[in-house]
Image: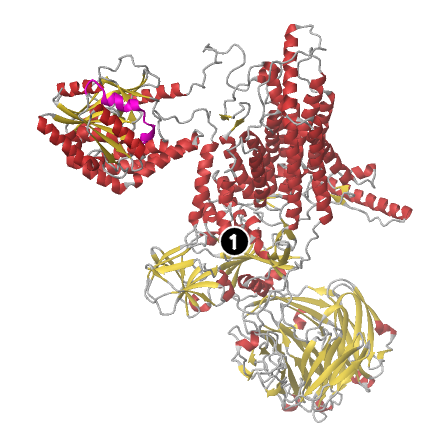
Amino acid sequence: MAKYHVTGIFLLEDPANATTEVFTSALLGSVGLDAAVVVTGSTIEPAVLGNLNRLMDASGVPHHHVVHTSEGSLAGELAEILETSEAAAQRTGTQSWLWFITEDTVVSETALAEQLQAVEISPSVAIAGAKQLVERQLIDVGLTVAHNGAVLSMIEPGELDQGQYDHRTDTFAVSLPGMLVRTDVFVALDGFDPHTPESVRTVDLCWRARLAGHRVAVVPAAEVQHTTHPEPGDIADRWAAAGWLRLKHTGFLSMIGGWLWGILVALARIVVGLVVKDPATGFAQATGTFRTLGRVVPLLESRKAAATTRTRPFDAVEELRPSRARVRDYRRSVLETSEPDRVIGDGTGVSAAPQEATGGHDDFDELATPERNWVGTGAVTLAVVFGAVALLGLRHLLGVPALAGGNLLPVTGDLGILAAKAASGFSLTGVGAPGYDGPFGWLLVLFGLTSNASEVTVWLWILALPLAALGAWSLAGAVTTARYVRFAAGFVWAGAPALLTALSEGRLGGVITHLVLPWFVLALLRAIGYQPDDIKLFRALRDDTTPRPVRLGRKLRDGTATTSLTAAAWVAILLTMVTAVAPIMFLPLTAGIVAIFCVLRPTIRTLWWTPLLALTSMLPAIVTHRFDLRAIFADPGAPAGYDPAPTWQQLLGLPHHIALDAGLAELPWLDVVHPAFPWAGIAAGVIAVPLVVMAVIGAIAPGRGGGLARTGMLTAVVGLAMGVLNAATIFAIDQTGVPVALSTIPAVSLTWLGFLVAAIIGVNYLTVAKSQLRTTAQHTRVRAGWPARTATTILALTAVLAAGVWLTPRMVPAETLAQARAEAQDQRGVAAAEAATDEQLDTTAAGHEHLTGTPTVTGVVQRSLPATAVDAALSDLHTRTLVITRTTEGIRTHLISGEGTMLDDMTGTWTTRSVTGGLFNPQPAGADDADNALRTVAAQLTTGVDADPRPLLDALGAGYVVLTDPAGTETSLAAGIDAAPGLAAVGHSQAGWLWRVVPDAVAEEAAPGVEVLTSEGATPPRGTATARARIVADDRTIAIAASNPDGSIDVQLPDGPEGRELVLAERANPGFRAYVDDQELTATTTDPDWVQAFELPASGGNLTMEYAPAAGKWLWWVPGIVGFMTLLLGIPTPARRRIREAA
Amino acid sequence: MTNNYKPAPKPAVEPSEPAPDTGSTQRARRREAALRRLERTSLSKRTAAVLGLGTAAAVATITVAGSLWSPAPPAMDTAARAAELPATPVIGVCPAAPVLPEGAGAEEDLDFSPLSSDAVTALTVAAGSDLAGNIPGISYFPATPGPDGPGSTEHITDSLDEELQQGPPATAADDGTVRQEAHFDAITDPAGNGQPIGLTVEPVGGNPGLAAATAQYAATDGDLAGMTIGACTPAAHQHWLTGAITTTGTTAVLSITNPSATNSTVDLNVFGDDGRIDASGASGIVLAPGQTSSILVAGLAPRQESVAIGVSTSGGPVAASIQQHRLDGIVPAGVDTLQPAATGTNLVVPGLVIPDDAADIAEAAGLAGQTPQLHLASTGAAASATISLRGPDGPVDIPAQASAVELAPGATTTVDFTGVAPGTYAVAIEADANILASATSLAFNPAADNDDATGNTAAVDTAYQSATRPIRGETMVALPALGGAESQLILSSDTAATVAVTPITADGDLGETIDQEIAANSAVTVTDGNATAYVLETGSSSVYAGVITTSDAGISAMPVNSVTATGSGLPVRLGY
């Protein structure tokens, strides 16, 4: 064997822990080494080095020590020694080889001999590897690289070495331990590539050797024993390495393509990770990929270096690579063996269908109550009952195109405009105002996806009762298993006075919050893995084996409860929905989540991020409004003033103040029974007291349920506190002059929900804790005792009462009801007078109060304005309409853009501008210049002031004036407006009287109006000189610039006189930018000085204008991405399988 | 919600429990074990109850605290605010000189000519400054009978800067002193064409300028012998006129003028002795800007003792007045201008003169109704009115038949004051429904007597005074100047009040202010021979003022009304 001169290279990362055996096995094999090099890091203790030297000396091998740094090239560091080795080999006429040994491997005695024999037989083999083993388990017998760059051994985990791979010779690559490399090849290839990720440097070397025309072979007879299975390594590292290999050893174009593909793959991995509820793995994979993609310069350098030695085409290695199908098979086998806890069947080895109901779903119901009906019967009954109540009570809303009253208004029909409004930082309402409307706009966009958002609100109203009942029924299912209790919970929730009031008075936030809250709590309970006591109890009854892991979600440490990432995602989504319709509710709900997270932190890790989605969705509003909390937390929708209930009434579930000593306006006939009775108070008490009593019983229950009930009580405390806060926070003044507090309905709903959950536990407690303990062994069937049944029945009956009170006035003909009320009022008056005389008390005759809200919601048409005005508003002129309405206090006016005032226009910015001052010290805000202009022009028109209103109307962009007067009775006011110069009466329609603003006489001579500039150039006049954007010279409108639907402008501006201006009928705002041929224009204001204007050059060009909000539109990407990821997490999948990586 | 659940040990058999059935015993054991596990892993019952009651107490506490704290709704004045309106020029219309109906002969014998040889017209204009000495810009233009727009505009005073017009009211001149000035002008034959004159008074300091103007006509021969004065009244959308007569011998011509810049469509409601009259041609009268139109009242309501006309317009505001002249055969029996009257339930007509020779006049008259009279009209519902006359010392006795009157719906009536002691009075009327009123005074007019030709010696002139609205703040009164006119300013008040009266001389100098006390329900007369105009100022809101002028050419009267800023005070709320 003197043909070869072998230099052993000992690569030691941690020399201190290397066993002596590593060295002795290599040094004292059947073929000895001719030289040895110890490669260590720079920090090696001298004592260790001394020991190594002694070891080498003892075996009589000449040795060197080389310090290797991870950045340096090993070939460079070894160059001198290699030269020496080669020289020595040449002297002796032998071939010089390098033999790599790592610190945790022991080579077999004949390993080197076998390998040298192999290379002797096949001289073209430049690299010879060894079989890697842990005792008898195979690690690899040569390596291969899949098409995605992953390095694979193609050996199944735990496979024993039975010689089944001993026929292998040529292989794609080999492992480093025991790798024998020809020195000249090693030098020619410049050794290991320092740019390449460390884990695949060997593979890279082998690959380059292959491409340089050498063979790489494995010598199965040469065995290398590892002490342990090598760690598979970090997922990110593996993906980085795989990506690197793929990009390095390919053509330039393929590299470009692969690089781009890598981005897609990385994003896809994130998505997949979210979908299968293992976001950590997905993110790690993406991180790894991106790490490689980011190292462009090292990659190019590395490719360049490799290109110098490459002599064969890249596809020369193709046949050594496994087919994709093989890789897939291999991966599947790895996956199956790596999840030993996923047992098919019941774990006894019998794979047939289970004889008992012990399958993969929650089956105890079938076991415990085999003779009972289908579990969903209660839900169907609830849906039918409350569907019927809703259809009867809201039948006047069937088929209406839109709703109005309370917070409600029609919603913009065009989805594009709806989305533009949601995204834009400038509200086009009136003369415009900067401000985002937060997530509410996007909720309306969701509504708009059905192509008619207004219709969605109508159906939301009609379906609210059954939906509320179903929500509570589902929630109750997580707290109790008693079906009757679930049924009653549905009743109580749908019959909650807060919901009925919200439905009557058009409180959009209240209705949606009430519908969402049960699902929110349900998701929260699922996310923390709450299991009701009684379910656990039943389970224990069934068998004594340790509880089976529940299949949804991941196992907790104690193996009884499961947390669910899916449910946590839904917590985030539902929280965002509540935040959208009642932004202030973000505070208590987030506080609740944080509290639960803090208390359960050791076991619950899935919750911490859930408020992020809602928080980021408010980000643009927060950036825009900064410390203007009013605008941030304003209830969306039209502000509608109300009288908030005091806290003790909120405790009774009443959000709006009612005089409890009054009669019931819904049931005036009660006064026939006794006119002096405080019927309203009696009804409120009957509805609320049983629930509160049951809640208190629940709160004193022991066990896990008791804990939940106490949490429910604390929720009620928070809800009541929010009620106080909301009632004290005036955020707007509505259009009748009533201050508007934040709606108390969501807060009352929260309180009511806390009570409901506690009350369910209370019933549970009466059912389980008491009756079960007293049942003898003969009566093992779970049976609710009479207290529980009675309590449940009472709860259901209170809800029936509430719903009945709501429904009755809607079923009785209006005249009958009015008559009954009048009579009842008289009787109350008489009774009060009698009481006053009898007892000398100052009892004023209390009237009648609506316990379930004053009915105000009505169906309206989508477009309330005359069609001509709407057409002009929706054209590229964007004209507005000045609407004047006579009220009891004078007149009311507003400026309408688009097809009318829409729900989506009611942003916090817009509604809160009527109030100023501290949060708890509100003052009516003075109108700004633009508002004053609006008020002035309205007063001017209605009081017959003989001044030309056109300058102001032009400044407001108002092309039409409407006097709201459907009945046509305001003829004198209309006559006054007729008198105004510059207005041409169009006539009277359903909406009222309509006037058109006519261009002044000067412009009228040639053709009516001025020409309209569009992106295609100037177009003929359209009979008007009023529009949102005008070109003005010498105080005269000379042209109109067409606006795009989103408010931006892009038109061809012809040459014109000096000193012309682009005048926008918008409040001046620094966010407006205008350009002519990319030349930015000077922003200015014009007379009146609230109007935005730009100085135009004399030369024409492409005139563009846009609004760049303070908080850029890109801010929506943050909640958008968070929302997308949350949604992926929220897709319910049978989340049992994590992404397992092939080893 | 603790999760420290651990697998249970083997369930212990309950010793006291009998076991009749093995299967159920097994299950009972399991159940007992499960229950025990449940109890062991969670709070003890007592702790749970204490905690539960604690949470209930927390609910109670927050309820009580929240109810007690009960945030009182912050004191917010959410009433709708009045919109700021730019002060606009007040455009008034001064009545035209009386003219004979078309076709009245021009070629006849001069002695018998209905035309006057010495008819003169004049416009007196008085204006006061603000505290900085700024006198409002005043200009006038003649209206035209056709639709071709008004005549050319003449400036009486120069326009002020826009800033002075619209800015805040001045409190002092630039040098810090208060400077108050006045302006007086008398323009002879202002219209040239004999048409009504539109008078524009520009605002000062955001308020209507303090100015007044009076048109005067005087003639001593012809059918239109007599004198009439008329205050220039602001254009409006609604006017009420009463006192027109359409019986033989009386010619009443309704003159409607549109001084505004937009077209007006005028509708007339005519009320006669028996109620409302459906008059043809009384609606849809279109007036172009600057156009004036004359309508013979007899054509609307023939042969009526008393006609009331409601003028309502849509479009531009208009001014309306009625020229009325009477002939007793060929003896002139009075010429006058009927000006819009205030409507209401409590009316005051400030200015009724009952001369010493009132009985002689009535006797000499060949015409009916040549007595001091009150014309009343109901504008809608039936009304019963109580009438009193206010003299300098309070109410005076009047005949019973003149003190109370019933009005049918929409009907007019006259009340005869024959028998009332001579003097100058204000007439106060209280009614239970909206009514309108005007009073007629009479005087012999020797200048119009034409003994040479006809031997008539009993020419009479009439003076119509309509009910006025109370004056407010500063009010300017311009007195007529032609024909040796002597004017009395009559002030009447429902309650005791003081009026500061400042005369203005012909040179435009402000005279010394006198504080005129008025007792409740009385009427006082202010006479100042040197005054050509007065500035009245009162804090009371129940002072009524009128002017009665006697001259060489006859007698006439005119109401004094304050000019108020239109539209100010209209609350406007922004909706959505």
The residue lying at 50 percent from left, 64 percent from top is: A1090
> Which is nearer the eye, B507 or A95?
A95
On the question of residue B341 being in view, the answer is: yes
Can residue A29 be found in the magenta stretch?
Answer: yes
Q: Position of residue A17 (x, y in %)?
A: 34, 28
Q: Which residues are magenta?
A: A12-31
Q: Residue at x 69, y 5 (%)?
A: B20
A770 or B513, which lies in front?
A770
Q: Quadrant of residue B574?
A: bottom right
User: Camera-side residue: A259 or A45?
Assistant: A45
For label 1, the residue is A625
**Above or below, comparing residue A688 to residue B313 in the picture:** above
Q: Residues within 10 Å of mark 1 (few under 14, many from 20)?
A: many
Give the percent coordinates (x, y) of residue B10.
60, 13
Q: In the image, is A1048 to the left or to the right of B51?
A: left
Q: Chain of mark 1?
A: A
Residue B573 among those drawn in magenta: no
Position above or below: B133 against A579: below
Task: Left or right? Give the position of A602 relative to B473.
Answer: left
Residue lying at the far bottom in this picture: please name it: B452
**Nearer-the-camera pick, B328 or B469:** B469
